Image (cartoon, rainbow, N blue to C red):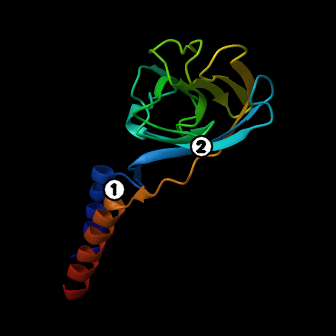
Amino acid sequence: MSLSRCSATIAVLVVSFGFPHVTHAGPITYTFEVVATSGPLTGQSSTGTFSFDNSIIPIGGGSVQQTGLLTHLSFIWNGVTYDETSANTGTLGFSGSGAGDLAYAFFGTDCSSIQCNLSVNLEGWLVSVGPGGGVFDYSIAGGGRNFGAGAATLVSPSSVVPEPSSLLLLGTGVALIRKRWRTS
């Protein structure tokens, strides 16, 4: 195989499979921290994590408003453990950077696609948070002064492992071409 034919074949592979084309598979996970600054649990703090699938990120940024956006949630508040089945999403907003960076998140124990609520005498919470900080509101079961507020902080996401299949395919093609070229 001639060098020019080899180069042309590599060019076709690059155009066909992208170079370097790396997609991200799986969830993106963020950590959030809350601290109660008012109400009956003043001074209490907790750290949680939540994940969402990167396939929901709108191209060019924007927001997604619906329940069930979180694929994973782990959070303990006032001795109660919450997960993605006992708390739900209101909105996830993404920057237009092209990297899918989370601009803000709004979720809690009683959310619809557009708002979250707290009920008197019921245990519950809601978080509205972005990279610059956020708010945390909560209610606890029982009568009297059972509402409180606090601060929320969003921590950078965990690294997503790139899916190497496209580069593996491209590398295999190049290796086969080099082998044929050397034996010609």
Q: Which residue is mark 2?
A: 48
- Left or right, 11 with respect to 151, comes to left
Specify the amino acid type for callout 1: Val
Observer-nearest of 12 and 67: 67
Residue 132 position (above or below residue 25) = above
Closer to the camera: disc 2 or disc 1? 2
Q: Position of residue 32 (x, y in %)?
A: 64, 40
At 27% from the left edge and 51% from the top edge, which residue is drawn? 16
Picture layout, residue 145 above or below residue 80:
above
Which amino acid is tagged 2?
Answer: Gly
Real-space Cα separation, disc 2 to disc 1, in angstroms: 42 Å
Q: How many marks?
A: 2
Of all residues, the one furthest to the bottom in this rendering is 183
* Residue nearest the viewer, comparing 67 with 156: 67
Where's the N terminus, which quadrant? bottom left
Number of other residues with Cα within 10 Å of mark 2, as a class: few under 14, some 14 to 19, many 20 or more: some
| In this view, 106 is above or below 23 | above
Query: Image quarter for residue 129?
Result: top right
On the picture, is 42 further left or further right than 164?
Answer: right
Q: How far from the left and from the top, in percent, is residue 28?
A: 48, 45
Q: Which residue is mark 1?
A: 14
Q: Is residue 174 left or right of residue 108?
A: left
Side of 123 relative to 174 (left or right): right
